[in-house]
Image (cartoon, rainbow, N blue to C red):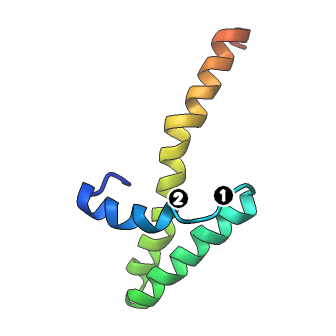
Amino acid sequence: MPYIDPNVRKQFDEYLNKLPALITKGNLEYCIFKLMIKMKKERKWCYSDLHDICYSAHHCGDEFKRRFLDKRENEAREKNGDII
């Protein structure tokens, strides 16, 4: 998943930290799509490479959900009570 070598991380963070605020969903989707297109241009036009590009975005969404959205849902359940 997104847990890459810290030295490689620094290289990406140098550029990512310069991005303007990603206020809207559309801003984030635009950036993700542009990164996917960039990777497509740097890989072969074959199923496995296209699949890797598509599912890397999907897996990041899964990881974000696991770390943040699920936590928020659990907090709401604890505060308001379970529905089962």
Residue lying at 64% horizontally and 63% vertically, measured from the top left: 20
Q: Looking at the picture, which amino acid does disc 1 mark?
A: Ala
Q: Is residue 69 above or below residue 25?
A: above
**Nearer to us in this view, 6 or 74:** 6
**Nearer to us in this view, 66 or 19:** 19
Quadrant containing the N terminus is bottom left
> Mark 2 highlights which residue?
58
Residue lying at 70% horizontally and 64% vertically, measured from the top left: 27
> Mark 1 highlights which residue?
21
Q: Secondary structure at mark 2?
A: helix
Q: Residues within 10 Å of mark 1 (few under 14, many from 20)?
A: few
> Is residue 61 rendered to the left or right of residue 11?
right
Q: Residue 47 at x, y = what percent?
A: 43, 82
On the question of residue 5 being in view, the answer is no
The image quadrant of residue 11 is bottom left
- How far is the residue under mark 2 from the one under mark 1? 22 Å
Residue lying at 46% horizontally and 89% vertically, measured from the top left: 41
Q: Residue 19 at x, y = what percent?
A: 58, 65
Residue lying at 74% horizontally and 64% vertically, measured from the top left: 26
